[in-house]
Amino acid sequence: MLLEEPLSPKGMTVVGLVQSSVGRMAELIDNVLDFAHGRLGGGLTLERNAHVSLGKVLEQVVDELRAAWPERRIETQLAVTKTVNCDRARMAQLLSNLVANALTHGASEEPILAGASTLDGSFELSVPNQGEPIPRSTLERLFQPFFRVAARPSQQGLGLGLYIARGIARAHGGSLNVCSDQEATHFTFLMPLA
């Protein structure tokens, strides 16, 4: 409602900060609810839909992250040429969690790449980023709930993003894996199309 009123530049800045905070809080609440639902035995619920372009949904997620992180470069390489029968909202959540993780832990001067493709009967979504490699001891715990690697003093979150991302992958009959070396840290979601 405030955005519909004439505001000073300072007022616009304050409204922008409020919007960012509300978005971050909503994401935290959603993650806690997903965690609780999964722990209570219900698992993650899916609403599969093969009729909406998945590429457009993924591009919208990246556009939202670009707006939230204007100082960072996020590139896309989307080649989703076949129908993907999946829960679009959950795929958006998975991509958002992976890109947000890369933005938090990756090298700030290097771009983040969000890639998606349909090849050989599979759908693949990948998010590589450059930066320090993840130690083996950390890799073993990375997908555990509430596990966090401190990256920056201003770091937000509860340590549920990767745990929920893996839950989304499994709910779709797919897998989410990570490999990390001196060149890059690479998260890859893979699921069969059929």
Image (tube, grey):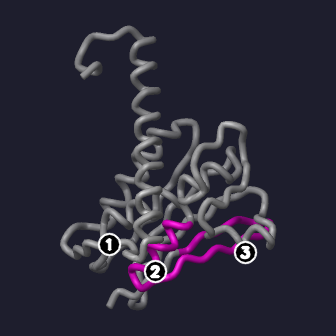
Residue in the picture at 22% in, 73% down? 49
Q: Which residue is mark 1?
A: 45
Give me the C-alpha separation between circle 1 and circle 2.
Answer: 11 Å
Q: Earlier in the sequence, mark 3 or mark 1?
A: 1
Residue type highlighted by circle 2: Arg
Q: Which of 113/132 is in front?
A: 132
> Residue 166 at x, y = what percent?
52, 73
Q: Residues within 10 Å of mark 3 (few under 14, many from 20)?
A: few
Locate residue 50: give its quadrant: bottom left
Q: Quadrant of the C terminus?
A: bottom left
> Residue 38 at x, y = what percent?
44, 71
Residue 182 is a magenta residue? yes
Give me the C-alpha separation between circle 3 and circle 2.
Answer: 18 Å
Choose mark 1 or mark 2, whichever is in front.
1
Q: Which residue is mark 2?
A: 170
> Residue 22 at x, y = what percent?
41, 36
Q: Which of 52/142 is in front?
A: 142
Residue type highlighted by circle 3: Glu
> Residue 142 at x, y = what percent?
67, 67
Q: Please provide the residue range marked out in magenta.
A: 163-188
Residue type highlighted by circle 1: Thr
Locate residue 146: give its quadrant: bottom right
Q: Which of 132/14 is in front?
A: 14
